[in-house]
Image (tube, rainbow, N blue to C red):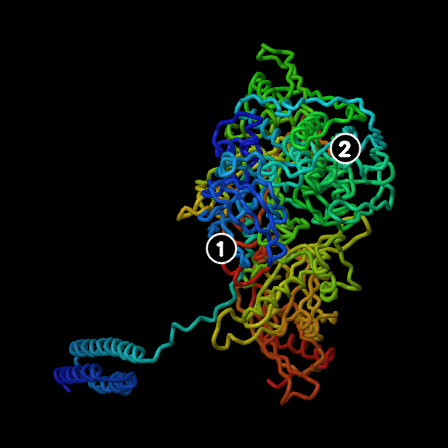
């Protein structure tokens, strides 16, 4: 909310400068977002008196005005404002004036008619946003005098975002009370007192409250003989400075009182009310109401309406219907000053997506004791600005009297929570200054340990417990004065849990292998997630979806990291990256039964594409292939201590046929391979892309911690190279496993060094060449021993997989 | 031949061989010289053939002379060999060492995770252990247990994404406190980094998914005070931003803490001046000189009650801050959307 300092000063006589006020407010917990200075000197802008208004001969929307600016001659001014009329007092910019926005006023011809000045709107004078017409000055404004004399002193606006729990600060008087406490000043009597101050109740206008929980208090006063007119400049200006648009004197007064005192009011045109009567009731299911903003609302029984004898005339405390609003022809009013339940008002705000200044206040909680005083203030302003007389007393329907809450504050408790020694007398004084009633049963006894008895003003709906009072004490004491205390960890040692440590290790390993970490959005397009789903899941896609997404493309929680990482890959390839090594480790989401929290396993996804080297100009420019990717994934798993992975062929959807593998360590750990060309195209990836999609928890289960050093033999091994012809369909892993099984225990290591198919190899066969290392702990092997093992290997391979030893 | 004649022949051979070694222009010529003079059938051997006819005393003298010749010639041949090799090497056409290396890809952590790691390390140093909680939360943990019962006005401000009537995408990392407290009794000293969601329109300073870190310190039967909180946060801010940072601890409002507080730090762009060079208003702190970075407070008694703690015995503080904001402030990142876009030209700037 915006608070003009001039208005605040009507409530508290604070003389400090704006910066000091802002600092104090900020340190009390109400940070001032901005200090805005308003008002200008307006050289050569004077009070003009419009004498005649005639239609411009050449333009329907323009008027020719004769204006007296006190210059000795009557000036001709062309004006485009719809509200200009003879007799008005207006700001007149004379030739030679320069407006705050920099506009210089010159003698000019507008569609053939001479204009010797300009009539100004509020916006042109930077007095607010209103540009719908020229600014009407008070009728008694002295013609020819500089307008700055009419506007008064330039002002200062404080822009403050009021905390949710302090609706009592959503008004000038509320902030003034805080300043009074901050500066130890008295709160001045409300200017409302000048207008009589009190409302007589016991009137006979029929008011029925059918839902006392939703409307604990309703005051209605009939006023007759009203004259609707624009508000005087001082009032219009205040509203505009505080951010509201002036409409007419009656509506403006209700808004003025709301801004000043915090009580929203509503004025009905009495003659439009059927009955006339007021009924506060729950809406009927399906009841329709067109609110002031022109939208038809379908209501439910959760909504509270203000109805007349037959129909709903508005959502209580939120927004009225147009047909009961005050118009230029209104002569009689019903003024409402009421208390509505915050929960009910919030419900209407969220169901209908409408927010109004009234709903903002009712929704957070208005002081239930405020209704009569605010009504009195408004009635006083009506009398002054709109004429009219009260027709009888006001009708009041109250469900319950608002009884101030009484709380106990144990000074020791406050000291214990704040960590500062604050005397009980000091606490009592500060609370009293903030408007609390304080009774000290141990007054005068500084060491007394009886609690203070605190009466909470009804406007402070946020204070409901002793702890709230402790905050109040701390706020008054000043958080900046809390002592610095030595830090101790109390013997607590900060650590990371195992799953986070594993994630950190995997991240470190991938970064070490040249992969760049990405963080992609968790909200994704379900259609896209459905395309990547089969890469790492079986069955049909099962997604966690959002009921109220920003759009369909962010309406599901990701089920894998592939979608996001592929998007990153496509983006960077489009921008010229010669190759990619990307990864992400993050949560993915899988629904469980309705009402249960979804599963949130942590997935690891790495992506490889393009050049083998980050920068290279010769052989390094070669593109990565399956075995490049496999080598990197193997290096990753080696770093993580997973050394028992089997690479089984995998034919899942989405992967390129024959270039994908299911990595298992007894159970599934990861999938790796090349993205299938069709899916790659769908994901805007034009070059081969290799992926690893792993479940981090499975990695954790598969990894082996080194428990103990196993030793190794220092004797050199004996190497023998063997090459075989064998059917192309037999995988290397099968050959290797047979070699190791038959070669045990002397065969220590098997290393493949050549794979060949083609010339010199029988059709349907391939040649695999292995380097075998034989070793025995603690002794040198004899040639005959090795020969024997080799024979056994060769015959086993021949028998089991049809392998033929090639000539040496 | 007499001893004198042999010595003379050796002297002549010595002079001729050493001069020849000096003259030789190639390693090959040096090799040929070595064979000619020192080889098994070489000239030195030839000269020494007469040795067997000499007296033993003469034999010694001649033998010594022969050995000297052999050693000196070998030494000179070695030196010349090295000289010739160096000369040949120096003349060879070298590599263009300015050509780029075959550089492996250089991996990097994401800047947000780097900041998260750093904050975790700082809080580990202050005794806080890392924990977490689910990103899809139930209404109880995200709201009700945090003193945000149904109908609480502050719920409106959370712009919540709903998975179902009872499940939401967590709007803050604070529900992690509840889960940690449900796990066991005090003392607890924990931090919870993680991703959170708000149904907000996305622009340069707002994302509908972003990152927070919350922390709690809870004790039973031993008071934890607002002054403890202040001192902890000031220390954390110094370690995060730098020891020269100025701090401002002031009241704030959060439903789940009471009393509540905010910690402001002096603007890291303008140093708290509010203006940058030329007197222009600092765009980072909008002229105030301060940046809000941490929300905090004493955990609300209602929160303790919701997990079955006795609020008369248990006290504790909590704090939270936005990781994205810290990263953006620290690295002068103008647009929050850059953080999840993962353009390599962005990611590669953080080492």
Q: Disc 2 is attached to a residue of which chain?
A: A
Image height of A483 relative to B140, above or below: above
Residue A108 is marked as 1
Q: Nearer the viewer, residue B36 or B235?
A: B235
Image height of A110 relative to B171, above or below: below
Looking at this rendering, what residue extends furthest in the top direction?
Answer: A444
* Between discs 1 and 2, the one toward the N terminus: 1
Q: Nearer the viewer, residue A405 or A190?
A: A190
Q: Residue at x 67, y 17 (%)?
A: A453
Q: Nearer the viewer, residue A441 or A387?
A: A387
Label 2 CA crowd tier, 10 Å (few <14, some 14–19, many 20+): many
Q: Which structural element holds mark 2? A: strand
Instruction: Say left or right for A331 vs A434.
Output: right
Residue A334 is marked as 2
What is the distance, in whole Å, between disc 1 and disc 2 at their CAs? 49 Å
Question: Which x, y percent locates residue B214?
Answer: 62, 42
């Amino acid at each position: 909310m915006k608070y003009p300092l001039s208005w605040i000063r009507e409530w508290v006589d604070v003389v400090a400068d704006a910066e000091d006020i802002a600092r104090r407010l900020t340190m009390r917990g109400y940070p001032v977002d901005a200090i805005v200075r308003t008002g200008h000197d307006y050289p050569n802008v004077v009070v003009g008196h419009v004498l005649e208004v005639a239609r411009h001969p050449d333009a329907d929307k323009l008027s020719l005005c004769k204006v007296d600016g006190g210059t000795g001659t009557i000036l001709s001014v062309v004006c485009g404002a719809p509200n200009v009329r003879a007799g008005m007092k207006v700001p007149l910019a004379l030739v030679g004036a320069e407006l705050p926005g920099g506009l210089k006023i010159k003698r000019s011809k507008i569609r053939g008619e001479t204009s010797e000045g300009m009539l100004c709107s509020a916006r042109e004078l930077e007095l607010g946003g209103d540009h719908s017409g020229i600014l009407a000055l008070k009728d008694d404004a002295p013609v020819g005098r500089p307008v700055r004399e009419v506007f008064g002193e330039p002002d200062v606006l404080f822009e403050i975002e009021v905390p949710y729990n302090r609706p009592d600060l959503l008004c000038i008087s509320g902030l003034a009370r805080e300043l009074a406490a901050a500066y130890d000043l008295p709160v001045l009597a409300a200017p409302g007192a000048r207008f009589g101050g009190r409302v007589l109740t016991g009137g006979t206008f029929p008011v029925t409250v059918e839902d006392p929980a939703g409307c604990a208090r309703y005051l209605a006063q009939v006023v007759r003989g009203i004259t609707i007119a624009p508000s005087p400049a001082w009032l219009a200006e205040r509203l505009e400075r505080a951010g509201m648009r002036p409409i007419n004197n009656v509506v403006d007064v209700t808004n003025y009182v709301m801004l000043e005192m915090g009580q929203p009011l509503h004025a009905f045109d009495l003659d439009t009310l059927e009955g006339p009567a007021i009924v506060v009731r729950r809406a009927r299911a399906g009841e329709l109401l067109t609110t002031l903003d022109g939208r038809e609302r379908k209501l439910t029984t959760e909504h509270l309406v203000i109805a007349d004898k037959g129909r709903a005339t508005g959502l209580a405390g939120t927004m009225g219907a147009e047909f009961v609003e005050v118009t230029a022809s209104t002569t009689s009013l019903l003024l409402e000053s009421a208390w509505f339940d915050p929960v009910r008002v919030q419900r209407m705000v969220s169901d209908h997506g409408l927010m109004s200044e009234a709903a903002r206040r009712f929704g957070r909680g208005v002081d239930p004791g405020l209704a009569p005083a605010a009504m009195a203030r408004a009635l006083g302003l009506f009398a002054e600005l709109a004429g009219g007389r009260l027709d009888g007393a006001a009708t009041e329907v109250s469900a319950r009297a608002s009884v101030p809450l009484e709380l106990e504050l144990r000074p020791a408790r406050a000291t214990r929570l704040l960590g500062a020694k604050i005397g009980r007398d000091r606490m009592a004084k500060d609370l009293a200054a903030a408007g609390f009633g304080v009774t000290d049963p141990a007054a005068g006894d500084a060491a007394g340990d009886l609690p203070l008895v605190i009466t909470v003003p009804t406007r402070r709906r946020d204070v409901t417990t002793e702890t709230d009072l402790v905050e109040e004490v701390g706020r008054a004491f000043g958080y900046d004065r809390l002592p610095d205390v030595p830090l101790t960890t109390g013997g607590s040692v900060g650590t990371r849990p195992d799953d986070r440590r594993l994630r950190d290790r995997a991240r470190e390993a991938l970064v070490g292998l040249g992969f760049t970490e990405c963080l992609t959005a968790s909200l994704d397009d379900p259609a896209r997630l459905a395309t990547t789903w089969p890469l790492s899941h079986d069955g049909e896609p099962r997604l966690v979806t959002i009921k109220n997404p920003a759009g369909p493309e962010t309406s599901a929680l990701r089920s894998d990291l592939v979608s996001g990482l592929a998007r990153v890959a496509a983006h960077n390839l489009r921008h010229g990256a010669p190759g990619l090594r990307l990864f992400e480790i993050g949560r993915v989401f899988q629904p469980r039964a309705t009402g249960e929290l979804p599963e949130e396993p942590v997935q690891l996804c790495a992506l490889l594409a393009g050049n083998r080297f980050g920068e290279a100009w010769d052989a390094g420019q070669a593109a990565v292939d399956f075995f490049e990717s496999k080598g990197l994934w193997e290096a990753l798993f080696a770093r993580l201590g997973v050394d028992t992975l089997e690479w089984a062929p995998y034919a899942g959807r989405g992967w390129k046929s024959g270039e994908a593998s299911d990595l298992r360590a007894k159970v599934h750990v990861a999938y790796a391979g090349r993205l299938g060309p069709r899916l790659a195209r769908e994901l805007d990836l034009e070059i081969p892309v290799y992926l690893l999609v792993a479940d981090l928890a499975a990695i954790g289960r598969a990894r082996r911690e080194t428990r103990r050093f196993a030793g190794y033999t220092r004797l050199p091994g004996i190497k023998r190279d063997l090459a075989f012809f064998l059917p192309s369909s037999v995988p290397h892993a099968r050959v290797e496993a047979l070699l190791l099984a038959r070669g045990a225990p002397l065969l220590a290591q098997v290393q493949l060094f050549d794979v060949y198919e083609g010339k010199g190899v029988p059709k349907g066969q391939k040649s695999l060449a292995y380097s075998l290392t034989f070793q025995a702990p603690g002794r040198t092997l004899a040639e005959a021993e090795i020969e024997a093992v080799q024979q056994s290997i060769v015959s086993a391979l021949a028998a089991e997989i049809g392998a033929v030893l090639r000539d040496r | 031949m007499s001893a004198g004649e042999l010595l003379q022949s050796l002297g002549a051979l010595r002079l001729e061989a050493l001069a020849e070694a000096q003259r030789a222009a190639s390693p090959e010529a040096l090799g040929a010289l070595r064979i000619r003079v020192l080889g098994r059938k070489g000239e030195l051997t030839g000269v020494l053939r007469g040795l067997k006819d000499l007296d033993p005393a003469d034999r010694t003298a001649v033998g010594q002379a022969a050995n000297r010749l052999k050693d000196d010639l070998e030494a000179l041949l070695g030196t010349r060999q090295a000289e010739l090799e160096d000369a040949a090497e120096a003349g060879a056409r070298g590599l263009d060492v300015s050509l780029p290396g075959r550089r492996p890809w250089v991996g990097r952590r994401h800047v947000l995770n780097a900041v998260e790691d750093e904050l975790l390390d700082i809080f580990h140093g202050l005794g806080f252990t890392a924990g977490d909680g689910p990103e899809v939360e139930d209404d109880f943990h995200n709201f009700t247990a945090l003193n945000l019962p149904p109908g609480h006005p502050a719920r409106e401000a959370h712009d919540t994404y709903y998975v179902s009537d009872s499940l939401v995408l967590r709007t803050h990392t604070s529900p992690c406190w509840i889960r940690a407290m449900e796990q066991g009794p005090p003392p607890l000293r924990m931090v919870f980094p993680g991703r959170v969601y708000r149904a907000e329109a996305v622009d340069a300073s707002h994302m509908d998914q972003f990152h927070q870190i919350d922390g709690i310190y809870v004790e039973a039967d031993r008071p934890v005070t607002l002054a403890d909180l202040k001192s902890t946060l000031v220390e954390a801010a110094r370690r995060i931003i730098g020891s020269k940072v100025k701090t401002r601890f002031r009241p704030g409002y959060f439903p789940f803490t009471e009393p509540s507080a905010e910690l402001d730090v002096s603007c890291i762009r303008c140093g708290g001046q509010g203006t940058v060079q030329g007197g222009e208003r600092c765009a980072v702190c909008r002229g105030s000189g301060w940046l809000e970075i941490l929300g905090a407070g004493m955990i609300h008694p209602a929160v303790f009650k919701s997990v079955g703690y006795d609020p008369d015995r248990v006290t504790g503080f909590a704090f939270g801050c936005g990781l994205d904001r810290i990263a953006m402030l620290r690295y002068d990142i103008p647009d929050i959307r850059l953080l999840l876009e993962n353009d390599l030209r962005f990611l590669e700037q953080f080492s």
